[in-house]
Structures are given as structure tokens and as C-alpha cells.
Image (tube, rainbow, N blue to C red):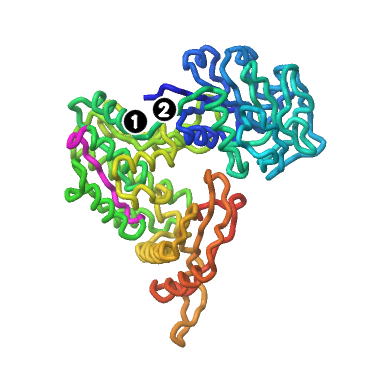
Amino acid sequence: MKKELVIVLDFGGQYNQLIARRIRECNVYCEVHPYTLGLEEIRDMNPKGIVFTGGPNSVYAEESPRYQKEIFDLGIPILGICYGSQLMAYMLGGTVKTAPVSEFGKTEVDIDRSSFLFGDVESKSICWMSHTDYIAEAPAGFTVTATTPVCPVAAMECPERKLYATQFHPEVMHTVEGSKMLYNFVYKVCGCHGDWQMSSFVDDTIHSIRETVGSGKVLCALSGGVDSSVAAVLLSKAIGRQLTCVFVDHGLLRKNEGDEVEEVFGPDGPYDLNFVRVNAQERFYGKLAGVTEPEEKRKIIGEEFIRVFEEEAQKIGAVDFLVQGTIYPDVIESGLGKSAVIKSHHNVGGLPDCVDFKEIIEPLRLLFKDEVRRAGRELGIPEYLVSRQPFPGPGLGIRIIGEVTAEKVKIVQDADFIYREEIARAGIKDLGQYFAALTNMRSVGVMGDERTYDYAVALRAVNTSDFMTAECSDIPFEVLQKVMNRIINEVKGVNRVMYDLTSKPPGTIEFE
């Protein structure tokens, strides 16, 4: 399925996934591994290139993560980024010190364009710096290829040994020509040809599923989100009616979403599979009655979803395989080796206990979210499903502050629908994520010369490339005003609309 491979060795950097994504955008397959990955394992993997990530440590501190010096003698091209560049310098005899002046943010860097790494890059380029240490002196045999007024080694290289390093982060969008630099590394330095194509992935995965499943029965928990939808269609293309999809409608989906899922995957849809829809709205509302604490709501919704799914699975009888929509960030964030666990994902280890199955199929386990969408388009899934924005597993349960009730769900569904409709009508296409949430604040208002005491809806819209940081989106005021007027006039129980300007950090993208 993959011939060329670049590996990212994670030294604790926050952008490890982003590096892999950017390299895959160059049509070169890339995986993230902990820095504890053994030298023999790397030899066996036979990568075309290696990237050292950034990290929070100082390379000269005793407890800092290191690697065997022999890695530099493998003859495999290596690109060190930030901490990775300092590690390369330190291990090969250079000097790393605390910088007299720390650099953070967009920085103009003077570039030596004769470097393979910087071909087609401007001689002065805006790059993203984030460091308090710096390389004071490059190792013997290295040439300095980029500088700033306060950073004497913003980039360095030893082409004879295929070793390259940048103090800045080429993977983040703030480095204006970063994609060119990574492209140059994988093609001009590593000699890749670009054989990571989504059409090949889809064809190979369908073939692999057929071989794995044989004549077995397969069960899929279908949420209607992008990941589970693409996984379901892949299985449908591979094995048809050997697949049964169970769709649990917990009553916390966006407006019309349950019907849209059934329209695509149900008996009148284009896919050859067995489809079971469970309308469990009242069951979930009952479990959530009186509950206001966000984490408790999450646990109740997750637990009840599993219980409903198990009940339906037992009606179907024993199955051979269970399908999960696990994607690559789920795997990374749930911990690779000794890497930090950012958050444990329900679909990486938290399986139902009572479902009788022999094996798990995770057809999207290698893909990032944007690649999942590309796979969906290759499979012909409707664009409104493929381009659907990220939606939390607990659904509107965490976009309703305080207790969840059927009345509040309808309010936020209707308000969110209006918001999305007006954004679409205005032709705004560059928003990262946007939605309406229901606060638990009630306030006095005046409508039709009468006093009201109703809820306040909060509108949220952010731009983000990685969902780790986010900035408030600058939506035109006239659009926000139109949304406000429609919500107040059309949604019963709302008399106030607010726009949330908070960035992440200090806030989060979701409300709870």
C-alpha cells in the first residue's frame, strides 16, 4: 500500500502531527513515532527520510530526550526542526546555549537560496520561531544557510551527510514558504517520487478488507460523522450486505442530521448494506435529566451510547468483525510508546465488553482528518457529509450549558441551522469551525411591547489549522446582525444573541 516512507521522531513537540500532515500533502507517506524507536527498527522500516521534531527541553539538560549518534551514519536524510535542530548540532559537536534574545512568532529570516532545502524560497522569508535556546555554533562540516539578527544559525546543513536543520517551524502555516521547504526535503533531498495517492489507498483498502473478512459478518457503529461514514462506505464497497450499520440517534445531533444519515445509508440510499436506526432520544434525555456538570454529561452520553449499541448488536447475533472509525490523530493522541497521552479516545481501546466479535477493522487508522475527507470524495460520498465540520461525540450535549432538555436541544438546533444557512448565503467559505451554543443565562428583553425572560444564544466561529490553537473568525457585522435578527424572531425562547471572541488558549473551541 505504501512504498516510500518518511518517519517523524517525536521529541515532545506540539506540532508532530502537523509535520506528518504537511509531508503527506506532498503525496509522500509519513508516520509519527516516539523518539524511543530503536535504530534496528528504523533500519527495518527503510525510510526515505527522518524528521526530528521540536520539543520543550534544553538539549544540554541531563534529562532531555536524546537519540543514538549512530542514526546520523545511516545515510538516511534527516531534517531537524527547532529542538531537533539543536539536538543535531549538540550531538555532532556544535554549541547550543540559552539565547540572549528569545524569538517567538513571525520572524523575517535571511535565506541562502543555494541550499536544496530552500530552492524557490525568497531570500527573505517570514518563518515561525519558538525558542529560548539557540545554536551558537554549527558543528564542523556544516554550513549556515539561514540567519536572523539574533539567531546566528536559523538553518544549517551538511549535504554530504544529508543532514539539514531549521531553528524555525516550516510545518506551521505562519511560515509562509514552509510547504516549499518540506517539499524540497522529501523530493530534492530524500529523492521521493510521491506514491501516496488517495485513489490507490481506497483501492488497496477495499482489496485488503475483502481478504480479511472473507465470508464473515461485520458490524459498524455509524454516527453519521465523517470518519464513521467513510469507514462504512469503504466496507460497503468491499463486502456489501455482509455489513450491518447501527445508527444510534441520541437526540443530540444537529437539525435534520438523523434523517440525512438515513437518507444516505438507509434502504433507499445508494449503498448495499444493512442499516438499523435506533431512535433513542427520550432515553438519553431521561439519563441527562438534572445533570449540569460537563464531564458527567460526557460520561453519561458515552456510556448510554455503548449500552444501546450493545443491545442492538445482540439482536443481530454474533459478528466476526467490529468496524471502528479510528483515525491517525486518535492513535497518536492516545499515546505512542512513551509519548504523552493527550486524551484517550473511545475508539482506541474503549470497546464494548458485551459485543461478540473476533477482530477489529480500522480502515482509516493511517489517515488524518483531511485525508479521510479526500477518501470520502474518492468514494463518491455526498459533499455535505464529507465536508461536515468536526462534531463532538456527545453532540449538542456539550453545546448546551447546564441541564440538557428536549426544549433546549430544539433551541440550539434551530439557532445553529439559521447560523449555518446565513453563513452559506453570504458565501463565506474560509471558516475553520462555527456553531451556535445555548448558554444557561436568561435575561430580560422586550418583544412586541411585552417583557420577555428568555435564553441567550452564543455564536462561535474560529479559524484553526490544527485545532490546538484557534483565533476568532472575523465574520462581517452585517452577517452577524442578520443571524441575530433571524434567531430572535424565529427561535422560540431566545431574546439575546452574543458572539464569542475568545481565542484558544485561553478558551476552548467547544463550550464544555
Q: Are marks 1 and 2 in contact (CB under 8 Å)?
A: yes
Q: Is residue 474 left or right of residue 309?
A: right
Residue that appears at 58% across and 60% down: 501
Q: Is residue 377 left or right of residue 117?
A: left
Q: Position of residue 176 (x, y in %)?
A: 61, 43
Tell me which amino acid carries mark 1.
Ser
Q: Is residue 243 magenta?
A: yes
| Image quarter (top left, top right, bottom left or bottom right) of the N terminus | top left
Q: Position of residue 199 (x, y in %)?
A: 34, 34
Q: Is residue 505 above or below residue 369?
A: below
**Which label is found at residue 200?**
1
Q: Is residue 429 magenta?
A: no
Residue that appears at 47% across and 57% down: 434
Q: Is residue 257 above or below residue 4?
A: below
Report crowding for label 1: few under 14, some 14 to 19, many 20 or more residues within 10 A (C-alpha): some
Magenta-colored span: 239-253
Q: Which residue is mark 2?
A: 195
Seen as rendered, the residue at the extreme bottom is 449
Rendered image quadrant of residue 128: top right
**What secondary structure is marked by label 2?**
loop
